[in-house]
Image (spheres, rainbow, N blue to C red):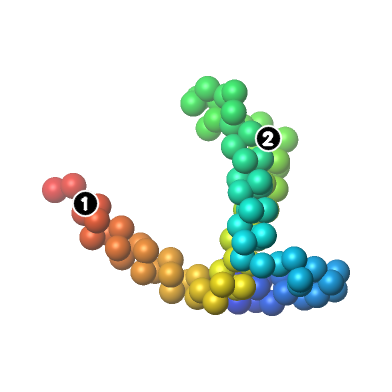
Amino acid sequence: MDISALQRRLRQFSADRDWQPYQTPKNLAMAMTVEAAELLEIFQWLTPEQSVALDDEQRRHLGEELSDVLLYLVQIADHGGVDLEAAVERKLALNAIKHPPRS
């Protein structure tokens, strides 16, 4: 996935709808939280076993909610001036130090 290209597409999508005044990092983070709650709702009453054995409709719904969260996350990074790819690489390196492999 080309994050920069996705950010350009999302900027154009927003511009075409005059949404830019509302697309602040704060508002986008709040919207992402709502979408994350909708993601959680998919699993709310499932057993652990059911949560890994979703049917086609549940999997489609899961994909939609994951996409919503990802799209907002990418927009937050864009509006916040964060190079998401670099931030992810840095975080993975920090996690590797914090959580070394078992010997």
Does 39 sit above or below residue 8? above
Q: Residues within 10 Å of mark 1 (few under 14, many from 20)?
A: few
What is the secondary structure assignment of the residue under circle 1?
loop
- Across and down, in percent, residue 38 comes to 66, 40
Q: Looking at this view, is 79 or 86 the one in front?
A: 79
Q: Badge 2 is on which residue? A: 58
| Residue shown at the point (31%, 65%) measured from the top left | 93
Nearer-N-terminus badge (1/2): 2
Q: Is residue 94 above or below residue 16?
A: above
Q: Which residue is mark 1?
A: 101
Horizontal and vertical percent for residue 62? 65, 42
- Residue depicted at x 43% and y 66%: 88
Using the image, tell me which numbered label, if any, was put on residue 5: none
Query: Can residue 39 be seen at all in this image of the molecule?
Result: no
Towards the viewer: 26 or 7: 26
Residue at image point 53% right, 32% down: 52
For the N terminus, the image quarter is bottom right
The kind of residue on which mark 1 rests is Pro
Residue 11 locus on image (x, y percent): 72, 74
On the picture, is 44 further left or further right than 57? Answer: left
Three-letter amino acid code at the position of disc 2? Gln
Q: Residue at x 14, y 48 (%)?
A: 103
Is 91 displayed left or right of 96 in the figure?
right
Work out whether 102 lies above or below 50: below
Secondary structure state at the residue bearing disc 2:
helix
Cβ–Cβ under 8 Å for marks 1 and 2 = no
Real-space CA distance between mark 1 and mark 2, rounded to the nearest whole angstrom: 34 Å
Residue that protrudes farthest toward the left in the picture: 103
